[in-house]
Image: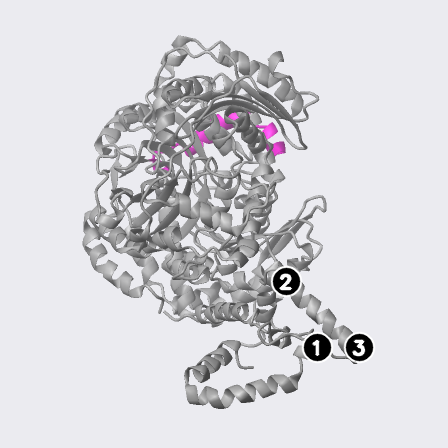
Amino acid sequence: MIRGSSLRSAAKNISARRFVSTANAQTKYTSLSNGVTIASEFNGNAAASSVGFYFGAGSRSEHPFNNGISALTTNALASGSSNGVLLTTHNGKELNGVIAQTTNDNIVEAAKKIAAIASNPSAALEKADFAATKAQLSAAAAHVEATPSLKVLEHLNASAFQGYSLGLPTLGTTESIADLEVQDSARFLEKQLVGSNIIIAASGNFDHDVLADAIEKELKVPQGLKPETKPTTFLGSEVRMRDDTLPKAYVSIAVQGEGYTSPAYYVAKVAAAIFGDFDHKSAFAPYTSAKLASLVQEYHIVDKYTHFSTSYSDTGLWGFNAEISNIASVDEFTHFALKEWNRLSISISNAEVARGKAALKVALLRELATTEAVATDIASKILLGGYRSSIREALEKIDAIQTKDVKAWAQATLWDKDIVISGTGQIEALLDYNRNRNEMAMMRW
Amino acid sequence: MASLTSVVKTADFILSRPTLSKIVNPVAKAFVAYAGYREMGLKFNDLIAEESVVNQKAISRLPDNEIYARNYRFITAHQLALSHQLLPTNKAIQPEEDNHYLIPYILEAEKEAFEKAELDNIDV
Amino acid sequence: MLSRVSARSLSTATKSIKVAARDAPGALTTLSVVVNNAGSKTGKSGVAHLAAKFNFLNTGSKSALRFTRESELLGGVFSTNVTRDAIVLNTQFLKEDLPYYVEALGSVLTNTSFRPHEFTEVVLPAAKAEYEAAHASNAFTAVESLHELSFRKGLGNPLYYDGTTKISVDEVAQFASDAYKQSNVSIFASGANPEDLDTFIGESSFAYLASGSTSAAPVELFKGKESRIRAAGESGAFIGVPVKTSEFGKYETLSAAIGSSVLAGAPSPLSKIAGASSFLYKYQDAGLFVVSVTGSAAEVAQGIKQAKKVVDSVSTTDLTNATKATQLSVALQSTFESPLDIKADASPVKLGEFNYVAIGDVDVLPYANEL
C-alpha cells in the first residue's frame, strides 16, 4: 500500500462530511411544449456563462456531396456576435451547436440571441457572410489535413467506417465545401431543426428559471421527429499516407469501441486510461506508471502517445495515436502497444485498474472545467445517448468497475479483433496489416 | 549478484562491532596488499564491474573531474599491464587516496532501481 | 464571485502565506501555489525556468518516481510552469486527496533536493524541449523580443532558459531558497473546505517555509524601439505598447473595440484583416498591449498597415460601444488564481510611440516608420 494512505483515510472522514455540502450541481431540465428540452447546470464560481443551442446532426447526417454542410451552417448561424455576447460553435460528427458566452448578468440577452437564431435560422443565414464562413471552414478543413496528428485520426475514422456517412470528415473537405450553397444550408436546417432534435444546454452562474422563461418566450421551432441515424459497421482496414517530407511517423491504431449508450462505456474509458498518455519531453516521463510508458521511454521509441476511447451514439473507436521521430522504431512501438493491449485480456493487475479508474475520474471532472464544455457535454449525452448521468452517478459507475470487468471487456472487444490502422509521415517501418493484426492475440494464454 | 547495498550494510555491521572488525580489518588489509591494484595505479572502486545498468548510471553521474581521473587511472593501468611493470611505491595509490568515490553513486542508483521494482509491482 | 475568499491567519508557522479557498460543486479540487517574484523577471535570465523544472522532482522525503506513481494512483495531475511574474505549481485531484497534495506542494517548496544528476538527466533536457517548442512559433519569438524592447530588464528577460549562459545547479538551488519565502507564496484552492485547508497547511511542510519576502525590481517602460528578425516559417508584424497597471482598463477596452484574441470569432475591425488580433499581456507591475498580424509576408505587410489604421481611427463611440464586450473579455480571462478586477474605461487612447517587431521574411515587411 502506498505511503500517505493513513493521511488519506483521515481525509476520507472529512470529505464524507464535506461531500454533502458540495454535492455536484444538479442539472435542471425544462421541457417545452414543442419538444425542446432546456437543461442547465448552475456553477456559482463561473465568471462567465454559456448557453448553447445544439442539434443532433453533423457529418454523419451528410453524404459525400454535401459533406461539411452541418459545420458550415452552424458556423454561419454563429457569425453575429455582438453586445457582449460571444458566439462560438461546436462541430461534431453527430452534434453541432451554437454557443453564446456572456457575463453572468447578461444571460437573458444571450438566451434571446440563441432563441432568435434557432427560431429564425434563415434570417441569421441571410445576415451571415456565407462566402467568408465558407472560406474559413475550408481553411479549417485544410488545417486538419495539414496537421498530421489530426489527419491521422480523421482518416482512421474514415477507414474504420468506410462506406458509411460516419466515415466522412467532420468539417468536410476543401472540395466538398467549395460546392456548398446557402440553399443546401436551408434544406439541411429544415430537416434537422425539429423539436425533438434540439436541446438548449447551458451552464454558469444564473437562475435556471430566468433562462427557461427567456427561451420559452422567444423560441419557436417546428415539432417533428428526430431524423433517423442508420447503423454503421466497423471494417478492419488500413490507410497509409506515407509522406517522407514530414519530420516524424504518425500512427494510429484502433478497434471498434463503445457508443454512448453502451453498458461498457466507462469500462472502455478506464481501459484507455490504464495506458494513458505519454510525452517523452516531459520532465516526468521517466516516472510514468504505465508499463507501456516504462518500456518505450528508455530507448526513446516514441515521442508522444495518447490512448483514446471515442464514442458516437451507437459505436466508437478505442485505440492509440502516436508520434514517432525515431522512425525505425515504429514497429517496436506498435508491437509493444498491442502486446500491452493483450495483457488487458489476461494479466492486467488490480493496481493498474485502480490507477486507470482514478485517472479517468479526474479526467472526466477536468474536462468539465469551462461552462462551454459543460453545456456541450449535457447536449451530447442527451441528444446522442438519450440520458445524462450526473457526475456523481458517473463516478459511482467508475468506482464499481472491477479488474474482471476490464478483462471481460477486453476479451470481447480487443482480443483477436480486427483493427484499423492509419499512418502518415515517414511510415516505412509501419509493417503490413497482418503483422499488426496478428499482435491482437497470443499463441499462449 | 548480491547488491552493493547489502555489501555496504554488512561492512557497516562489521565495523560497528569492535571484536568483529578487529578480526576482519587485518584480513581486509592483507587482501588489499596481495591484490596489488594500488601498484597498478587503481583505486578499489575502479575494480567494481561496470557492466550493469545500475553501475553505468552511477558512472554517468560522476562529476567531470572524477570521471577524468578514473579514465586516467585506467590508461595508467593498461600501460603498466602492457609493459609488465608496477608503479614505484611513491607513485602507487596511497591508502588515504583509495577512497570510495563511486560507491555512493551506485548506492543511490541501486536505491532508485529497487524503488522502481517495488512500485512496478505495487498492490492495492 | 469571490465572496468566500479571504486571507486568514493560520497557525503561527505559516501565517504570512496568503491562502484563498472556495468551495465548488463537483468532486474535483484545484490546488495551486503561486510563488511571486520568482518568475523569469527575477534573477539571472533562465534561472527561474530551471528552478520551475525542478518542481515535483526528488525531495528529501520522497523521490520523484514515488511521488509520480502515488499521484497517478490517486488520479491526480500536476504541472508547473514559469511566468514572467511567478513560478506556478498546479495540481488537480479528487477532493478526498487534499492533505496528500498540500503536503506534496509544501515539500516541493521546502525540501526539493536539487540533485546534480537530475539537473543534467531531467531538468536541462525538459527545459530545452520547452524552449524549442515555444520558439517553433515565430509569434512567440516576436512577443519575447517585444518584451525585451519594452522593458529591457526584468519583464524583458527571456521567459525560458535559452542556454546562452551556463547555469549551475547550485545557482538554481540558491535562487529557489531566495525566492521561496512565506510572503511570496500564495495558495489557491478551488473546491476545498477552507477550514480543512488551513489545518492541512498548518500541519504540512509549508510550516518549514522560511519567513520573509523579496521585492520585484522597479519597471521601466521604453517606447519607439524596433527589431527585425529573419526567420523561416510564418511571418508576423507586432506593434507593442508598454502599459502601466492603472491603464489596463483603457487598453482592455481598446482591445475589445478593435478585436481581441480573447473574443476570437466575434466580428470586429481587426477580424476583417487576415491574421490580425490584439491582446493585453498583464503582469503585476506593468502590461504590454500587442497588435499583431501573422501570415504570409505579403499579407502581413499589407495587414499591419491596415491594423495600425484601425487602432489610430478608433473613436470614443467605438470604445463606449465595446463596454459589454470588454466586460465579457475580462470575465473570460479572469481565473480564481488571478482574478481580474478591470473596469471598462472608454476614455480615448492614442497609440503614440510604440515598439515594433517584424519577424519572418523581413525583406517584405515594413519598417515602423512606414506604418
* SS category of the residue bearing label 1: helix
Task: Give the residue at x 52% y 59%.
Answer: A286
- In the image, the segment drawn in magenta is A174-201
Disc 2 + disc 1, Cβ < 8 Å? no
Q: Residues within 10 Å of mark 1 (few under 14, many from 20)?
A: many
Frontmost residue, C90 versus A91:
C90
Please give left or right for residue C212 compared with residue C278 in the image. left
Residue B93 is situated, as x and y percent measured from the top left of the image, at 65, 74
Asked if A159 appears above or below B73 in the picture, the reply is above
**Sequence-wise first label, 3 or 1:** 1
The alpha-carbon separation of the residues under discs 3 and 1 comes to 11 Å
- The residue where tag 2 is placed is A332
Rendered position, B5 above or below A318: below
At mark 2, the secondary structure is helix
State if disc 2 and disc 3 touch (CB < 8 Å): no
Q: Which residue is mark 3?
A: B82
Chain for mark 1? B
Q: Amino acid at mark 3?
A: Leu
* Image coords of residue A89 (percent x, y): 44, 32
Q: Chain of mark 2?
A: A
Residue A62 magenta-highlighted = no
Amino acid type indicated by mark 2: Glu
Mark 1 highlights which residue?
A: B40
- Name which residue lies at 42% across and 55% down: C112
Frontmost of labels 2 and 1 is 1
